Amino acid sequence: MTSRTDSPTTTSEPPAPGGGVEVRLVDLRRSYGSVHALDGLSLDLEPGELVALLGPSGCGKTTALRALAGLEELDSGTVMVDGKDTTRVSAHRRNMGMVFQAYSLFPNMTARDNVGYGLRLRRTAAAARRRRADELLELVGLGTHATRYPHQLSGGQQQRVALARALAIAPQVLLLDEPLSALDAKVRAQLRDEIRRVQREVGTTTLFVTHDQEEALAMADRVGVMSAGQLQQIAPPAELYERPRTAFVAEFVGLTNRIPGTATDGRAQVLGTAVPLLEGSATSGSVTVLVRPESIEVAPDEQGNGRVIAPTYLGSLGRVQVRLHDDSVVLAQVASHQATELTPGTPVRVTVRPTPVLAIA
Amino acid sequence: MAAVTRTRGSRWVLRWLVLVVVAIYLLLPLLAMVEFSTRGAGGTRSLDAWRGIGEDDDLVGSIVASVELAALTVVGMLVLLVPTMTWVHLRVPAMRRVVEFICLLPLTIPAIVLVVGVAPIYAWVTYLVGDSALTLTFVYVVLVLPYAYRAIDGGLGAIDIVTLSEAARSLGSSWFQVLVRVIIPNIRGALISASVVSIALVLGEFTIASLLNFDTVQVVINLLGKRNAGIAVAVSVAALLFAFVLLVVVAYLEPRRRDAQEDDTTAVPAPQEARS
């Protein structure tokens, strides 16, 4: 890696994509005064895997990514890339491609020159550099925009050029620091799919930081949820959503109702239904059960246990807020036609489907 | 409708009135200088004073020295300020106020006080480096700091210097390459502005050069004015014209960018993407 960067000779070919490498972050710690941005974070990325770090602002996800990039100094901990300790290696010698949240294209260069910048530093011959830059611009769907300057590109186009630029150096690891957050919803969804397609195509191990759970669940092989500098849980998206290990994960990923219940023998009684408990749940006594809106059923019933407060029509589905007789409020996901039928004040019966839930004491 | 037309008409008249008044205010002294420097014997017109510029060895020498001084001052200012300010912006933003204070300090110190302060130092400078007028570079770099700082600070503030440098670093740039290939090209306009202000300041500076006994163009013009006012005024007009030409050149050197919206008309949309 370093020899390539420092090589005084011009190479005729750009670096070949090296495929994915293994990444290990071991017990990373970083504090700013009394704030622990990273508090013993450990994380492994398999070769070619796309892992998303998800969490609220200030949870340390960006600090972790920047530590891997070499842009953030660590108080302690080890960063291993492809079996080598890179903790003390300077950022410009790590060979990691990075796409930033803010638009980061060099304003004085065309899209092609931006993409070829890293290759120029590696002394790749001009013809090979141009060829590689054009290939990557084609890959991100901007082959016709090679001679445009950043200010002549839209936000989404700029981020795609930034992705091409990051991939041009055949990085060992691709780092994506909320690259879609500055874009509008439609472009974000399109670019999300495109990044995933490109990442699969080149097979580069990728760490993706976002606070948007939909993005994380849609793109990642595994999603890690962070809070206060620690990894709360890392799992494939479906597992993370359906089998959260902590209340924080359950409530941060997706919507959750907190409903009082009673736990016994690995089950909890909630709204008259016995539901199985997930691993890590409180196992006995009075508990608060965390139930997804889609696990709650609502049916019109004059003798029911609640009344509709507010139905919300969301197009393909609907949501209904119901006030129960004990004055608590639950949110249920319903079919869109039901959302239009259940008007405020309608008496309803609320029940829980017997899907596994997390219960906390 | 008639009222709108009347309002537009009166605005038009007002604009031209202001323009004419300002033009008279600015151009009249210049025209008077040109008129004075071209006066010949017996009420005739003559270019003797202008021809005299090239024939006066002291004047030519001082012009050359001043231009060299201006060039050295610009180089010194850029070498001192650009890396320092970039580093402060990137690595120690908490020090920005301190650096700003230090750079603006020369504004608050009268030239005469500055001379009193640097005179003993210049005794050593003369002893160590020689008595060339070019040694004024040291004090002139200090003198131009406030103006150059403002221009460069504006340039650095106009780009996301942190993200750009981190992007460059992640792609393999050393700090030197970040500065030369990314930062400097993107603050070119600010650097040109800082340089122009510095050149104008150096070419017009009189007090320090005179009190430290160096023959710069302003000092020589002053001496010349006592024995041949025509040449002195001609040189002054030439200096003003030089500054004007410099500004025009700078206006053309300033990076100009096409408006992104304007470009939309020819933009080829990427697959499946609306402009964000």
Image (cartoon, rainbow, N blue to C red):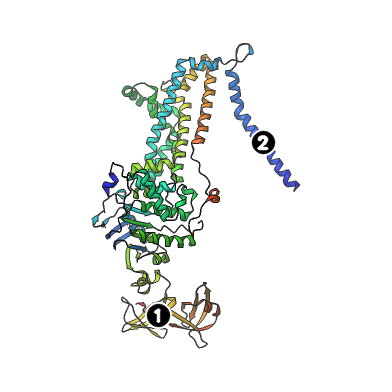
Q: Secondary structure under badge 1?
A: strand
x 63%, y 11%: residue: B42
- Identify the chain of the residue marked 2, using the numbered disc in the image: B
Q: Residue furthest right?
A: B2
Q: Nearer the viewer, residue A87 or A336?
A: A336
x 38%, y 32%: residue: B76
Which residue type does callout 2 highlight?
A: Trp
Q: Is residue A261 above or below residue B39?
A: below
Give coordinates of residue B124: x percent, y percent: 32, 24
Crowding at label 1, few (<14), some or many (≥20) Cα neighbours within 10 Å?
A: some
**Mark 2 sits on what residue?**
B16
Residue A255 in sight: yes
Q: Residue furthest top?
A: B42
Crowding at label 2, few (<14), some or many (≥20) Cα neighbours within 10 Å?
A: few
Q: In the rendered view, does B46 fall on the left or right side of A276?
A: right
Q: Is residue B234 above or below residue B193?
A: above
Q: Are marks 2 and 1 on the same chain?
A: no
Between marks 2 and 1, how big is the CA–CA gap?
A: 79 Å
Which labelled disc corresponds to residue A43? none
**Mark 1 sits on what residue?**
A260
Give coordinates of residue A358: x percent, y percent: 36, 76
Q: Residue furthest bottom?
A: A303
Give coordinates of residue B130: x percent, y percent: 34, 21
Q: Quadrant of the C terminus of chain A?
A: bottom left
Total number of numbered labels? 2
Which residue type does callout 1 highlight?
A: Pro
Q: Are marks 2 and 1 in contact (CB under 8 Å)?
A: no
